[in-house]
Amino acid sequence: MYRLLVAQVLLGCWIVAQPFCPSQCTCVYHGRSDGTGSRSVLCNDPDMSDIPVNVPVDTVKLRVEKTAVRRVPTEAFYYLSELRYLWITYNSITSVDTGSFYNLKVLHELRMDGNMIATFPWESLKEMPSLRTLDLHNNRLTSIPVEAAPYLVNITYLDISSNKLTTLPSDLVDIWPPFSGNLPSANASQKIVLGLQDNPWYCDCRISKLIELSKMASIPVVLMDQVLTCSGPENLAGVLFQRAELDQCSKPSVMTSATKITSPLGSNVLLRCDATGFPTPTLLWTRADGTTLNVTVVQESPGEGVRWSILSLHSIVFKDAGDYRCKAKNFAGNAEAYITLSVDGVQASTLSPPVNITKWPDDQPVTSFAGTKMPLYTTLSPALTTRAAKTTVPPPTTRKSPGPGGGIQRSPPAGDKPATIQQSKGGKGSLQSEKSKKKADLKDIEVVEETSDTAVLLWRAEGLPSDSPVTVFYFPYDAKDDKETVDTEVGQGKLLLEYLMPNQVYTVCLVTKDSVAGKEQCVDFTTLDNGVEVGQNKILMIASGIACAVAVPLIVVLLYKIVCLCCKGNSSRNNGPDDDLSKEMYVKFETLTMKQRTLNGQANDLWARRQTQESERMLLCSRSSIDSQMTYKSDSSRSEYLC
């Protein structure tokens, strides 16, 4: 009896110790021969409307399938710290909270296919650092924001097929090889599987990278279905990605004004970067290591597909030296270029003041420091008079990159002589300074009439003879070694610089025989671009063509008129007056009618005159006789005409 009671108690304790399984779910424990095991839970009751909350805590795999669940609430699985597989498939879920997957640190696979999710909380993926598989196919996703890219970097299996996606952000495609920067490798052990099919893709420049990805081979990216088709625009509807050709879509191309720049310490430097591409690319300046810059940047897009940017560095120091990266980016891709900046100068340091040692008349040397009037007596040799060396740092010169057609003169550093302090016999010091003397020099140096390959250098001599020789040397701004030298005379006043490169910054310097080494006069200028001259020539050609088109017909008509007049005059002179007689003429005549004869009538009264009608006028030719006579006939005869 005692043993039976003990057995019942042990059986009850064992039942209580077993994890509790939800009434609408099935819990299965998979044991192993080594005594370990895992638990999986399947909840597929069609009447279930909420995510179960009393799932055993040691569950490794949870499946909620074909239920009436419509929402995944916040922290729905926070107590399932050992959960590795979560399948919530073919339910009626429309809403997923941002904190739904809190504390799922070891979750490896998340499948939510076959639901009605229109918006997915992509930021919730940061709660699942071990996640590698994400299945969202057969939902209602319409877009994926660019902010989702950082959370999808570690995903190796992504299925977003059978949704309503029309485009993907360019930055999202950049996380996959080869756009991520990883070299393509056919033998890569880890492949990235993408499901993109059955979406109404709109094939424009925004998904150009995706189209390019579908055309690549031997890359560590595998598409579940290679048959990806365009749904728009109309001219590409139904076309496969592999055959789609996008119009007005080109990757950026970057060009810098120079690849290496050396500038003096403390000067101002302008770094310029130009980019072309369609759509118009954006430009971003960073250091070579990706560090952002907190400096002034000016950008402008003068036209579609073109953009330039200028980075301004003021009063540069040694830490500003290094590589600067200009990155251009658009939907079709990105490109970058580098500019190396070197700082030329001497690091400023605290120096001891110069020491002047002056011999007194009584052979006692006195040591005094510059900037003070207090002598320090020493015990030096009576015949010794020395002065400590003074180190001076010349002030930095400012060098700017001028725009096209402009020149900025660079003045040489001017060192100031230190004042000399002498101790008088009475113990009072007197400060004496030397006044600068006016020296012969070249003034008003400038460059004018710049073209793509020539420029004119002008200068004015002051205090120098006209036949004094002067040496002119010029070189590209960033290539001082490529120096060209020309010898001329000061009196010339100008010099033509030839064989220059178009759109290039040059430095030209003048040196006379009296110039001190390192103090030559220099000017920077920039040659014009070939495109400017070509544009001017085109305008002249068009204007000349228009003028010719208008003037030539007028000249032809004028010549024709002149020839006609000349021919007519010659014809009149050759024919003479006989031609005038041969012309037909009209004459006026009268009609004579016979009167009734009377007994006392005279012979002269036989005829009577009457006015002729317009219809009775006759044409008399020059061949007709003007001596025609009237013939008398009987009274019954018809009228005769006398001319």
Image (spheres, rainbow, N blue to C red):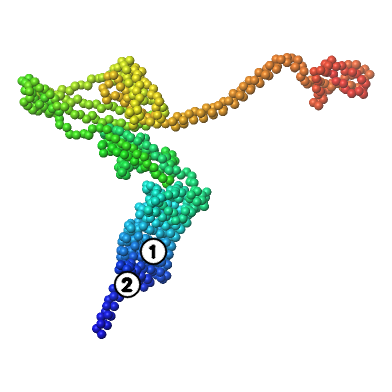
Residues under labels 2 and 1: Cα distance?
Answer: 20 Å
Q: Residue at x 44, y 56 (%)?
A: 224
Residue 388, position as x, y percentages in the image: 14, 27
> On the image, which quarter does residue 629 sit in?
top right
Foreground residue among 635 and 66: 66
Classify 162 as above or below 401.
Answer: below
Q: Residue at x 11, y 22 (%)?
A: 385
Residue 411, position as x, y percentages in the image: 28, 27
Residue 279, position as x, y percentages in the image: 44, 44
Q: Residue furthest right?
A: 599
Classify 528 as above or below 604.
Answer: below
Q: Residue at x 89, y 21 (%)?
A: 594
Amino acid at circle 2: Phe
Residues at discs 2 and 1 in contact (Cβ within 8 Å): no
Classify 8 as above or below 336.
Answer: below
In the displayed structure image, the side of residue 430 where residue 148 appears, left or right: right
Disc count in the image? Answer: 2
Foreground residue among 3 and 248: 3
Amino acid at circle 1: Trp
In the displayed structure image, the side of residue 44 where residue 359 appears, left or right: left
SS class, disc 2: loop
Q: Residue at x 26, y 79 (%)?
A: 9
Identify the residue position indicated by label 2 in the image. 20
Q: Residue furthest bottom?
A: 1
Identify the residue position indicated by label 1 in the image. 87
> On the image, which quarter does residue 523 sit in?
top left
Q: Is residue 296 visible?
A: no
Q: Which mark is residue 358?
A: none
Q: Is residue 332 visible?
A: yes
Foreground residue among 82 and 380: 82
Residue 259, position as x, y percentages in the image: 35, 35
